[in-house]
């Protein structure tokens, strides 16, 4: 059985799809998957042993000049590649208009979420069949439900299994030994754990003779890492490619992370991880996997799901909700669950 998956982005969303493939592989002996994914995330699906073909798409780049791109050789080549195979099923696991639109170029029955489960309800117009899932559940669970109903097997009650070989990545890591990784970078300002807290936790771990590394992905993150390191005794890593960063994640003894895509990779690798949530809700989009601890803010307006903090009263740190996720609480969780 040959199935095409449309799940283009983001990093976390792509990873959240992998356990559904594991479920399907256990239920259907001869199944294989092809996958349409954004070019920047094209290496992620290949980590799963049931993915036989990856079809990268530059949708984010092409949509900047939609009229020109629609008639470009690159877009024509992408559509030609999609039409080369006859699929038993085409599953839109993203549930957006763009992913549903792309699904129409592939040969095979189109399946997606039903109206009540879609983020963009009109996407259902592109499907031959729709499936209801629990819209309040975690993204991993929703995707597992979608695949089970689309492919006709019972929804598994087992823990999510990403089927990634952590040991293979560990062997490639250029950073060896026992260490803890601080994943301090993320996209929203409101999701950033306060620098003073990183410094305080780093100092405590230094006193305990625990090695701490700080990765970074852009200039802003590098400058923050250097500030934290200069006051805490932690060490800033050099600039790493995504693959090299994944190898370091796999080698880590434990990870402290804000709500970030790299945290989801750590979860997929089953690395003991403590993830810190202020404005976002771990019940919906938190890391899912073995050895995962979620510390969520216990604050009147949390989770607000907002990129901008509107809390106006005086507070110890910004954003104010993180006063309830202080270094002491993180250290306690680290000692209890990741030692």
Image: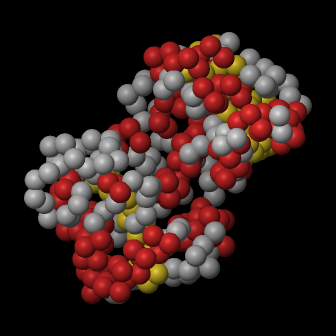
Percent across and percent down for residue 148 are 58, 25
As drawn, 119 above or below 221:
above
Q: Residue at x 62, y 53 (%)?
A: 164
268 sits left or right of 33 in the view: left
| Quadrant (top left, top right, bottom left, bottom right) of the N terminus | top right
Q: Residue at x 70, y 19 (%)?
A: 110
The total of numbered circles placed on residues is 0
Residue appearing at x 50%, y 58% in the figure: 262
Residue 104 image position (x, y, % from top left): 74, 22
Residue 285 x, y percent position in the rendering: 41, 42
Res. 147 visible in picture: no
Could you tell me which residue is drawn at 42 percent across and 25 percent down? 135
Q: Quarter-wise, where is residue 186 in the image?
A: bottom left
Q: Quadrant of the C terminus?
A: bottom left
Rendered image coloring scheme: secondary structure
Please tell me which residue lies in front, 57 or 6: 57
Percent x, y of residue 194: 28, 66
Rendered image quadrant of residue 43: bottom right
Q: Nearer the viewer, residue 107 or 3?
A: 107
Note whether residue 71 is visible.
yes
């Amino acid at each position: 059985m040959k199935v095409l998956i449309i799940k283009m982005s983001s990093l976390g969303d792509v990873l959240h799809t992998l356990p559904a493939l594991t479920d399907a592989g256990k239920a259907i002996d001869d199944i294989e998957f092809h996958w349409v994914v954004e070019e920047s995330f094209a290496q992620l699906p290949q980590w799963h042993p049931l993915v036989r073909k990856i079809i990268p798409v530059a949708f984010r780049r092409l949509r900047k000049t939609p009229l020109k791109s629609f008639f470009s050789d690159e877009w024509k080549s992408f559509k030609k590649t999609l039409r080369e195979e006859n699929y038993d099923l085409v599953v839109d696991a993203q549930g957006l208009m763009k992913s549903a639109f792309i699904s129409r170029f592939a040969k095979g029955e189109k399946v997606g979420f039903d109206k009540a489960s879609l983020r963009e309800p009109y996407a259902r117009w592109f499907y031959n069949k729709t499936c209801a899932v629990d819209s309040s559940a975690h993204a991993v669970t929703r995707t597992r439900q979608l695949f089970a109903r689309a492919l006709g097997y019972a929804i598994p009650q087992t823990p999510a299994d990403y089927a990634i070989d952590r040991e293979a990545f560990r062997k490639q890591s250029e950073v060896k030994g026992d260490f803890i990784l601080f994943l301090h970078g993320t996209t929203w300002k409101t999701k950033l754990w306060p620098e003073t807290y990183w410094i305080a936790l780093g100092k405590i771990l230094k006193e305990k003779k625990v090695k701490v590394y700080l990765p970074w992905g852009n200039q802003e993150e590098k400058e923050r890492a250097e500030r934290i390191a200069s006051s805490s005794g932690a060490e800033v890593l050099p600039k790493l490619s995504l693959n090299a960063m994944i190898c370091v994640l796999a080698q880590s003894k434990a990870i402290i992370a804000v709500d970030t895509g790299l945290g989801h990779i750590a979860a997929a690798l089953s690395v003991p991880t403590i993830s810190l949530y202020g404005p976002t809700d771990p019940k919906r989009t938190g890391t899912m996997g073995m050895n995962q601890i979620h510390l969520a803010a216990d604050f009147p307006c949390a989770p607000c799901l907002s990129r901008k903090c509107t809390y106006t009263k005086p507070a110890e740190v910004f954003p104010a909700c993180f006063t309830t996720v202080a270094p002491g609480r993180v250290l306690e969780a680290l000692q209890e669950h990741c030692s």
